[in-house]
Structure formats: C-alpha cells, structure tokens
Amino acid sequence: MPELPEVETVRRGLQRTIVGRTIASFDCDTRKMLNQPLPFYRQTLPGLKVVSVDRRAKMLIIKLTGGWNILAHLKMTGQLVFCGDRCSVVGGHPIKAGYEQDPNRFTHGTFTFRDKSRLYFNDVRKFGWLRLFSDADLSKQLDHDLGPEPLDHNFTLDVFRRELGKRPNNRIKQFLMDNKNVVGIGNIYSDEICYFARVRPDRRVKNLKDGEIALLFRGIKNILTEAIKYEGTSISDYVNAAGEAGAYTKFLKVYGRYGEQCFKCKGTIKRQKIGGRTSSFCLGCQK
C-alpha cells in the first residue's frame, strides 16, 4: 500500500492534470467501491468542477464545486490514469503487461470531463474506493480516528511526545505505523525512521530516552520530506506521476535489505516480525 510520500506524489500529479475540469459523467462497475448508490453519483457529479486535490493520511481528496468531494483510496493495487490528448499514469500501481490500454478490464471507475478527457480508476484487486461526501460529512470522516499529519507545522516535538505517552507499551514500529498516533507511515518508512534514530523497531515506547524521541521526530520529518522530493519509493509496483519508479528506493538504508551489509557499520541487516509485519534493522547501529 502506498505510504504518505507516494500518495502525496499522486496528489501532485492529479493537481496538475484535473484541476479546473468540469465533470460530465461518472460510471463505476463495482458497487463496493462506492458509499452511495451509483445513481446518486450520476445525479450529483455532472456539472461540478474540480477545485483542488488535497490529501489526508493516505487518502486523496478531490474537492469539487457545490460543496462536494470525492475521497479516494488506492489501497493495495489502485491506479489513476488521466487521458487527455494521450493517456498518462497519474500515479499508483501499474497494470501488468498486456493491459496498457485504458480503459481495460481492471478499470472500475471513470470520470468523463466536458472536454472529453477522462480519469480512470483501475484496480486489479478491487480494494480501493471512491466515496462521495458533502463538506460537512467529509469533515466528520477525516476527523475520525486519525492522528496528526507528520509534516504539518502543528506536528511538533511536544505533540509527538504526548502521542507517545498515550501508548507506552507499543513497539516503536507499531506506534509509527498506527494512523491513530501519526498518519501516513507504513512498513518502509517506519524501518527507515528507526534506523535514522538508531533505535530498534521492537523496543517499547516507554523505554525511549529523550534524545531518542527527538531523533525519531527528526527522522519522521526528514525522511518523509526527502521521500516526497524523490517522488516516493518503488519496492514492487508503485509508480509516480510520470509512470516511473519512485527514486527514493536508492536511498533506503535498511528496508528490504535483510542479509545485506549495513552501509555504516558493515554488519548484516537483520529482519524480524513485529505486529505481523517484517521489519529490517541493523543490530550494530540500532540499540
């Protein structure tokens, strides 16, 4: 599943391609992807213009005129493709060879704009969704059970300490990956943040020292910012707005490198299951 840097990269791709366009029609062949009956979408969306594209956690918010919004989640295999003069991947997960044409059998949602351009929502496994909310209902949705945005200026070291204090028995990796504590951090960046802070991901939050907390906080800010700069990380099938692999992959220090040599201490990168997820770390650098 894409993490915050990958979703932010997709958001920027959408911002460049669909803002200012007016929806002419919408169609979807998979009922579970919607939160309202399809006729409600078909009745509500035509004539609405795309005002902006925002992000909350790992969700995309397509803001429309008339007080309406599309809340989209790519989940495991979602992909957005914009077709104007030509088709270009806005971001997400590319369809395997043989399904380069859009729409294809994995296209489940289609926004057609008045200028005849289209935005396709493709999803091999159909876990992703496109939900329609009014402004009032969207606020309730986004405030429910979500922690602070890690790159927001309101997310300070004091806020981070306060959130840590609520979950003293959590493993550090589990804490970082829980959207109730801080949003958008998944398996990749939790490993990299722990390495940056020189702490093992399986340690308990309550055992962290003040200096380690400060390093974790810096790691969250620095690593996510850098990952966005390089348009995300591609481990299996994520691509950026140009349909290319995210370039942050070459900067990974521990994630996915178990059995390889640590760049710093030359020790061997180890792996361990923590909360059902495989975590990579260096015994020499992380304590």
Image (cartoon, helix red, strand yellow):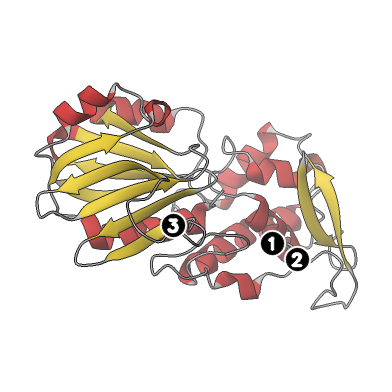
Q: Amino acid at mark 1?
A: Glu
Observer-nearest residue: 23 or 7? 23
Label 2: which secondary element: loop
Q: Residue at x 54, y 61 (%)?
A: 224
Rendered image quadrant of residue 42: top left
Alpha-carbon neighbours of circle 3 within 10 Å: few (<14), some, or many (≥20)?
A: few
Rendered image quadrant of residue 63: top left
Say which residue label 1 marks: 192
Tell me the distance, in whole angstroms, between the alpha carbons under discs 2 and 1. Answer: 6 Å
Q: Is residue 149 above or below residue 37?
A: below
Say which residue label 2 marks: 254
Observer-nearest residue: 205 or 86? 86
- Quadrant in which the C terminus is drawn: bottom right
Q: Position of residue 163 (x, y in %)?
A: 62, 38
Q: Position of residue 284 (x, y in %)?
A: 90, 68
Label 1: which secondary element: helix
Q: Is residue 218 above or below residue 176?
A: below
Dot label at residue 99: 3
Along the horizontal axis of the image, is 138 left or right of 211? left
Q: Amino acid at mark 2?
A: Val
Label 3: which secondary element: loop
Residue 144 visible at all? yes
Q: Amino acid at mark 3?
A: Tyr
Q: Is residue 170 above or below residue 254?
A: above
Q: Position of residue 80 (x, y in %)?
A: 37, 53
Pointer 2 or 1: first along the chain = 1
Q: Nearer the viewer, mark 2 or mark 3?
A: 3
Tell me the distance, in whole angstroms, between the alpha carbons under discs 2 and 3. Answer: 33 Å
Tell me the distance, in whole angstroms, between the alpha carbons under discs 1 and 3. Answer: 34 Å
Pointer 2 or 3: first along the chain = 3
Q: Residue at x 50, y 62 (%)?
A: 97
